[in-house]
Amino acid sequence: MFPINPKHNPSLVESILSFILIVGLISYFIIGLGTVPHIPILLGIFILITYGLIKHIAFKDLQDGMIEGAKTGMGAVFLFVLIGVLISSWIISGTIPALINTGFSLLGGTWLYAIVFAITAIIGISMGSSLTTTATIGVAFIGIASAMDASMAITAGAIVSGAFFGDKMSPLSDTTNLASTVVQVDLFEHIKHISLTTIPAFIISFIIYILLSPDETVTLQTGNNYQSALEATGLIHWTSWIPLVILIVCTIFKVNAFIAIGISGLAATLLASFTSGISWTEIWAIWFDGYTATTDFQPVNDLLSKGGINSMLFTISLVILALGFGGLLFVTGIIPSMLMAFKEKLQKVRTIIVSTAATAIGVNVLIGEQYLSIMLTGETYKGIYQKAGLSKKALSRTLEDAGTVINPLVPWSVCGVFIADVLGVSVLAYLPFAFFCLLSPVITMLFGGKALKE
């Protein structure tokens, strides 16, 4: 379970009212006022601290709750720093320019969004990481879509859908391994079982993306302008593909994501020092501030001017605030009391499945962390599934369908803020078009109790 013990036991009504107040506040500020998520999250922290003090919870306990909550995201924080370096190093080594250049040759016709979805899904399975997939091939695709005057929101939705399909179906994925481990189901049995809902969601999403794809996305001349400008950067060489190959090889051999990204980024940096003509002093500056392109074609400059540790600081600060906020929700007892109330009232199979999905979604919305969504929901419902005679695979599948894929749809979540920052498209803009992520929990709830008995 979550490593924070509640210091107060509020009633269910009190917890629900607190939930409505906090979610309403966050929604109003982000949607109504258009503020960055940091502001309502910080205000939410102030409200929860005030609530805790009124309930006679010592400030030290509240502070410890925030710290413990933030600790759960430290792995992601260090990974985000490294991804900032990876993006900038992949640009100066020519990897991202080469991917974009190749993309113009592949995506110049019809079915644009469907092809983006399918290719991102394949890359996602091979990498086993939705965030790495989004930060690499996703960045390339969003750049291509911008150049083609295609919808950035739909393209981002297709990228997110493909990346999270790959994340769910890959044996290399940390969330897939976590869901199977928490519920004690064999990894490959788990993947086989989630295909019952994942494959239909993929097929439906693919068809929708075909229908939404424009008949013509870019004129030949426009595509040539971009490709000429990309070639003129002098960044693209045959060696530009090496960092991508290294990353894929590392994932095949199940190398830890942090180490794999680090190796690929270092290899890209070393290659760039030989091929790009950029000095080592400039390279270290690019590591922090990102790359700034200076071609004669401004759209390509906009496309390649990104990356660096500095670009990740917005995301990192929000992740720390959001997880600290989640820690306060636990130490004040708001989430534990709601979980226990749901746990005690579940009897029917369909109700159990729907409640499991709703709990996983709720944890994502309140805390913004997919790992905690899987762990908390899994630990809470294991006994309920066993008592009802439901298969463990049913629980692990529901955790993936409603836990993993919902996180990128929450504006203040770990995945949501990262993806919005990397792709330059807000969560609320791409959310209606992330069809796979929207369909997965719906299908798993409609699927109900079929073939779920032990």
Image (cartoon, rainbow, N blue to C red):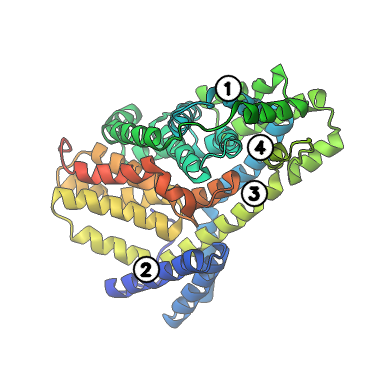
Kindly identify the residue that appears in the image at 62 percent across and 33 percent down: 261
Left or right: residue 85 compared with residue 170? right
Whichever of labels 3 and 1 marks the residue nearer the N terminus, that label is 1
Q: Measured from the top left, where is residue 400 in percent x and y?
A: 35, 41
SS for callout 2: helix
Q: Which residue type does callout 2 highlight?
A: Ile
| Number of residues whose C-alpha sits closer than 10 Å to that of mark 2, classed few (under 14), some (14–19) or many (20 or more) | many
Kindly identify the residue that appears in the image at 51 percent across and 29 percent down: 127
Q: Measured from the top left, where is residue 85 in percent x and y?
A: 69, 39
Separation (CA) of disc 3 from disc 2:
31 Å
Q: Which residue is tagged 1?
A: 105
Badge nearest the viewer, 4 or 2: 4
| Number of residues whose C-alpha sits closer than 10 Å to that of mark 3, classed few (under 14), some (14–19) or many (20 or more) | many
Q: Which residue is tagged 2?
A: 334
211 vs 135, nearest the viewer: 211
Q: Which residue type does callout 1 highlight?
A: Ser
Whichever of labels 4 and 2 marks the residue nearer the N terminus, that label is 4
Left or right: residue 90 compared with residue 353? right
Whichever of labels 2 and 1 marks the residue nearer the N terminus, that label is 1
